[in-house]
Amino acid sequence: MLKDMFKKTEIQVALIAAFATIFTIVGSIWTSNLTNNNQLELQRIDEIREMKRTYYNDLTEAYTLKLMYNDMPDSIEKTEAQMKFLKEASRLPLYASQEMVEFIENMKNPIIAKNTNVKEFYIIMRKDLCSNEFKAFENLNDMSITIPNNVIITDSQGNKKIQGK
């Protein structure tokens, strides 16, 4: 009888050890998956932020050139600056917040661009870069792709000149 009792106790201890092992393995797998998913999410956020930063660098350069040539007479440089700005502005909906897209839409107008505080541009950009969200636009009615009035063409002799619409 004592022998049977020891056998039952051994079986109970073995079952408890087996269940503890199973729970440990399941817990380890769950924790590993959770950690891996978090690392993948953080990596995705870093990649998106880096992509945005690259595009914002291009946009900032184009915006600066646009403002620099805004009051200058028509020239190849002014036309190139306008073309680059419009190209970068057309890319915005692919990565930027709606607030930035709306801000740049207004900057397409030279008078508004001249009278706008550049600080506002940087505030919106920083806010967008620090955001980990990518929200759908609420209203697309005011967005457009703007084609420049003038473009640069190269004639058969390799000379560049401004061509109007």
Image (cartoon, helix red, strand yellow):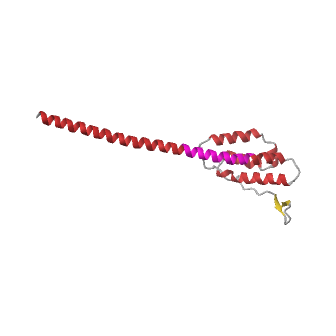
Asked if residue 146 is among those painted magenta in the image, a careful observer would answer no
How far across and how far down the image is residue 9, in percent?
A: 20, 35
Corner quadrant of residue 154: bottom right
The answer to whether residue 54 is left or right of residue 28 is right
Disc tally is 0
The reply to whether residue 165 is in sight is no
Corner quadrant of residue 42: top right
Q: Residue furthest left?
A: 1
Q: Residue furthest bottom?
A: 156
Please name the residue shown 87% across and 48% down the image.
Answer: 72
Q: Quadrant of the N terminus?
A: top left
Q: Quadrant of the C terminus?
A: bottom right
Corner quadrant of residue 162: bottom right
Q: Which residues are magenta?
A: 42-60
The reply to whether residue 42 is in sight is yes
Return the residue nearer the eye: 19 or 144: 19
The answer to whether residue 50 is left or right of residue 68 is left
Q: Is residue 154 above or below residue 70?
A: below
How far across and how far down the image is residue 91, in percent?
A: 69, 53
Return the residue nearer the eye: 102 or 131: 131
Asked if residue 52 is among those painted magenta in the image, a careful observer would answer yes
Q: Residue furthest right?
A: 73
Please name the residue shown 73% across and 49% down the image.
Answer: 105
Please name the residue shown 52% across and 45% down the image.
Answer: 40
How far across and how far down the image is residue 121, in percent?
A: 73, 42
Magenta stretch: helix, strand or loop mostly: helix
The answer to whether residue 13 is left or right of residue 23 is left
Please name the residue shown 75% across and 56% down the image.
Answer: 146
Q: Residue furthest front?
A: 157
How far across and how far down the image is residue 30, in percent?
A: 41, 43
